[in-house]
Image (cartoon, rainbow, N blue to C red):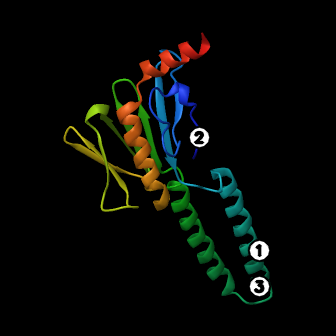
Amino acid sequence: MAASIPTRLIGTGAPPPSRIARELSHPVSGERTLQWRLRRNCSLTPRQLLITYLVLSALSLGIAGAFWFVGATLVLPFAGAEVAALGVALLYYARHAADGEELRLGRHALTVVATQGSRTESFDFQPEWVRVEPEHGDGSLLELSGQGRRVVIGRSVRPEVRRQLADELRWALRRWHPDVARADVANAVA
């Protein structure tokens, strides 16, 4: 989740406290943005998950089939229930594996795209009007609010890192501007 940003690309002032963001450039327009990707730490890809499920199911049903063959017929229905329950649990895991938030700070907008399950919501804020606050207290989820809208972020970020994320967002909203970053790059090249 962490990426460093060269301070010459950020503009004036001190570098952000945690450096979770990374700078991007749009391929067509060339507009610079800062991006934060807040994703769950999933150790299995969907393909690996499917292979694991198939191997565990084959193993369980194979053992149950051997017991059925020697006369213990009740083992097979319980193994089938076990495979079904495992399938439901892994389906739930797979459905929420891509949950998270993506924040992009550009010249005129802070865009937040929140994904949870099959639902994706997008929020646009004017950067100069955004407030970043903990929802309840230190270490809780972060609330972005402005222009009568609010969105809660940070579900996939460890509680001890949320304060750093809030500090970096506040810093970026106050100081980062793509035109300043572009001028710094031009001065660094010259």
Residue farthest bottom in this picture: 71
Query: Is 68 above or below relative to 15?
Result: below
Q: Position of residue 184 (x, y in %)?
A: 51, 19
Q: Please tell me which of labels 2 and 3 falls first in the chain.
A: 2
- Numbered label attached to residue 31: none
Q: Secondary structure at mark 2?
A: loop
Q: Is residue 17 left or right of residue 140?
A: right
* CA separation in Å, label 2 and label 1: 47 Å
Q: Is residue 116 visible?
A: yes
Badge 3 amino acid: Phe
Q: Nearer the viewer, mark 2 or mark 3?
A: 2
Badge 2 amino acid: Ala
User: Which residue carries the number 2 mark?
Assistant: 3
Q: Secondary structure at mark 3?
A: helix
Q: Residues within 10 Å of mark 1 (few under 14, many from 20)?
A: some
Residue at horizontal 21%, vertical 37%? 147
Most foreground residue, 160 or 69: 160
Residue at horizontal 74%, vertical 84%? 68
Most foreground residue, 53 or 72: 53
User: Which residue carries the number 1 mark?
Assistant: 62
Residue farthest top in this picture: 190
Q: Nearer the viewer, mark 2 or mark 1?
A: 2
Residue at horizontal 46%, vertical 26%? 11
Image quarter (top left, top right, bottom left or bottom right) of the C terminus: top right
Q: Position of residue 62 (x, y in %)?
A: 77, 74
Q: Position of residue 28 (x, y in %)?
A: 51, 15
Residue 80 lies in what quarter of the image?
Answer: bottom right
* CA separation in Å, label 2 and label 3: 54 Å
User: Which residue carries the number 3 mark?
Assistant: 67
* CA separation in Å, label 1 and label 3: 9 Å
Marks 2,3: beta carbons within 8 A: no
Q: Please tell me which of labels 2 and 1 falls first in the chain.
A: 2
